[in-house]
Amino acid sequence: MNIGITGASGMLGTALLNRLSKECNIYATSRNKGSVRKNVRWSCFDLLDLNELKNWLEYNNMDIIIHCAAMVDVDRCEKDPIVAEKLHCITTSIISNHLNKVGGKLIYISTDSLFDGNKRTAYTENDETNPLSIYAKTKLAGEKIALNIKKNIALRTNIINYNGDTSNSLSDWIIKNLIENKPLNLFDDVFFSPLHVNDLSDIVYELIELNATGLYNATSSTIVSKFKFGLMIADIFNLDSNIITRGSIKDKKFVANRPCNMGLSSNKLAFLLNKKMPTVDKGIELLKGQYDRNKDR
């Protein structure tokens, strides 16, 4: 099977490349070359160069494309909405049209930020969306484009991973500050259900094997606040949790509006895969394993 991955040098792209290249031929694209492995062919270009994107689609015979390239800086999207729309919507439309023509499948990596956050319980795939930011609005528009083609999967998710000093992810930032004994102020009124990137990569492979289609929440089975998430990391990493204090998103002046509740129910996906989704603490244990391996190098 031939699989294309956009944003293949990013956090999720790298994990997908490493997981799927064991069984499939991978056509990876990003601005810069990432992981070099057997069965991986790299094409480095800016995805916003639409002619290059069209050439990549035409010259590579791909059965499936996993579109995980995104502008994840929510405030930057607010400042540059044209780029956000081009990356999240126009590239998705071009990829979708090509796959519709050749009979291929699109797997679109969406986000957990598509709601206003006013619901007190986990959001399901059937809940009405109400995005608050340019990032969320353009990601939702891309999701709708992806779901409109014949063969599709859209995964709403929030991922965690450990990359050390090379990443600006929430989990990396918390771990780095805990290790350096720097005070952390984490939101006690923002909730999410993060999934480790390796678990998401396994799920993508299982969905491909099942020839599944449709919209799924791909998250952990538990919902925690950002504050609680930090405490759990401190506990599992055996670091000092006393340097973590409670904060409120109401006291932070972001450029873009953000929902307080991003917790998603993964029951639909768990039923399809006939397995329990990992809990947040299991994801943190995977972070700890990554940290230990990196430390021992």
Image: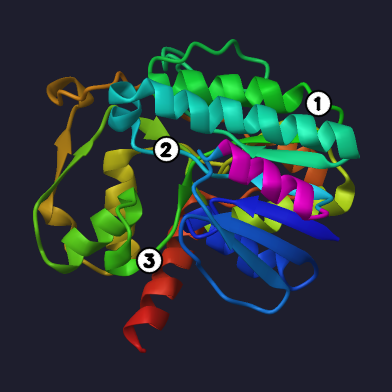
Q: Marks 1 and 2: CB-CB under 8 Å? A: no
Q: Please, what secondary structure does the residue beneath circle 3 have? A: loop
Task: Name above or below for residue 250 compared with residue 270.
Answer: above
Give the spatial CA distance, label 1 vs label 2: 23 Å
Residue 110 quadrant: top right
Q: Is residue 227 left or right of residue 54?
A: left
Q: Range of the magenta residues?
A: 50-61
Q: Which residue carries the number 2 mark?
A: 71
Colour pattern of the rendering? rainbow
Question: In the rendered structure, does residue 70 fall within the stretch colored magenta?
Answer: no
Task: Name above or below for residue 127 compared with residue 145.
Answer: above
Task: Name above or below for residue 121 compared with residue 208.
Answer: above
Q: Which residue carries the number 1 mark?
A: 149
- Which of the two discs, 3 and 2, labels the residue nearer the N terminus? 2
Q: Please, what secondary structure does the residue beneath circle 2 have? A: loop
Q: Position of residue 278 (x, y in %)?
A: 59, 52
Q: Which residue carries the number 3 mark?
A: 163
Amino acid at circle 2: Met
Closest to the observer, 170 or 108: 108
Amino acid at circle 1: Ile
Packing grade of label 3 (10 A; few <14, some 14-19, many >=20) is: some
- Which of the two discs, 3 and 1, labels the residue nearer the N terminus? 1
Q: Position of residue 193 (x, y in %)?
A: 48, 39
Q: Is residue 137 left or right of residue 244?
A: right
Query: In what quadrant of the picture does the N terminus appear?
Result: bottom right
